[in-house]
Amino acid sequence: MVLLLVWAGCGHSSEQQARNMNSFHGYLRYSVEATSEDSTDVATFYMFSPRYVELWMNDGFLRMIETGGASRGNILIDRQQQLAYQIDTVHQQVYRGVYSDFEEASDELQAMMPDHYRPALENLQNDTTIAGLHCTEYLVIRSGYTRYGTDTRVWITNDLHVQPQRFDIETDVNRATTPLPLYLGASEGLVVRMQYETDGLMITYDLSAWDSTLTNTDIFTLPEGWDVH
C-alpha cells in the first residue's frame, strides 16, 4: 500500500542531485498487462489498475494521464508552486489537491522505511533491448511495494536519464500515484519493464513508448475558464 505522507525535513541527497543533473524533458508511456487462466481475475484487476499511463515531464512540471482503472487520473503537478490538480475533462472542472514526493523523504523517514525508499536488487547479468533501450535484468530481493516471496523482476536502462518521479497525489475526487516502475525507487536507473506474479495473475509493466523531446508545453497548463475547486 502506498501511503500519502508529509515528508518532514526534506533535503536532496547527493544521489538525487546527481540524477537530476541529467533532467529528462519528454514523454513516457507505461502499458500494464495482466494475464491469467481466469478471465474474471483479469477483469477485476483492470477495474482498479489503468491499462496504460502517459507522463509528460520537465524540471518544473509533471502531467500524468491514466487510461482505465479506478482513479482516472488526469494530473498536473506544479513543483514550483508545490500544487497538484486533477483535471476533469468530462465536467470541465479542476480540483486542487496535494502531493508527496518520496524522493524527498527525510533521513529519519528513510531509516524508518528503508525497503520503501530503495529496493534491494540482484543483477542477473542478463542484458536485452526493450523499446530500443539497452536494459539489464534484476531480481527484486526486497521492496516495500512487492509481496514477499513473489518472483519480481525489473529491467533497467541507463540510456534515458529520467529524474525520479515518485509522487502520491490526492484530491477531493480521487487519488493516484505514478506508475509502479517509477514509484519503486530503483537507484540503478530507469525501470523499463517490471514483471511479477500475484494471486494467479502475471502483471507486466512495459515502457511502450518514449520521446526525449518535448515541444508542446501547453500540456502543463490548466484549461482556461474552468472552475478550480
Image (tube, rainbow, N blue to C red):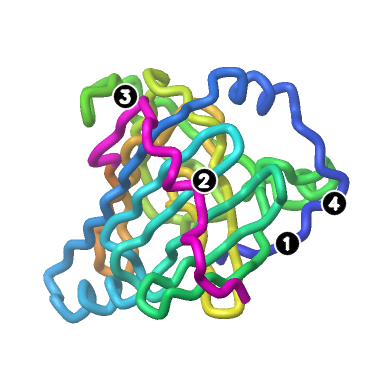
Magenta stretch encompasses residue 80: no
* Callout 2 secondary element: strand
Tell me, yes or no, whether the two marked residues, 4 and 3, touch with CB atoms within 8 Å.
no
First in residue order: circle 4 vs circle 3:
4
**Residue 119 or residue 17, whichever sits in front:** 17
First in residue order: circle 1 vs circle 3:
1
Label 1 crowd bin: few (<14), some (14–19), many (20+), radius 10 Å? few
- The structure residue drawn at horizontal position 30% and vertical position 58%, both measured from the top left corner, is 197
Image coordinates for residue 218, horizontal then vertical, percent: 43, 45
The residue at which mark 3 appears reads as 135
Q: How far apart are marks 1 and 3 (CA)?
A: 32 Å
Give the amino acid type for the residue marked by disc 3 in the picture.
Cys
Image coordinates for residue 126, horizontal then vertical, percent: 28, 22
Image coordinates for residue 114, horizontal then vertical, percent: 69, 45
Give the amino acid type for the residue marked by disc 4 in the picture.
Ala
The residue at which mark 2 appears reads as 62
Residue range in magenta is: 207-229
Q: In which quarter of the image is the N terminus?
A: bottom right
The residue at which mark 4 appears reads as 8
- The structure residue drawn at horizontal position 67% and vertical position 63%, both measured from the top left corner, is 98
The residue at which mark 1 appears reads as 5
Label 2 crowd bin: few (<14), some (14–19), many (20+), radius 10 Å? many
- The structure residue drawn at horizontal position 87% and vertical position 45%, both measured from the top left corner, is 9
Q: In this view, does 228 lie to the left or right of 161?
A: right
Image coordinates for residue 147, horizontal then vertical, percent: 47, 59
Q: In which quarter of the image is residue 131?
A: top left
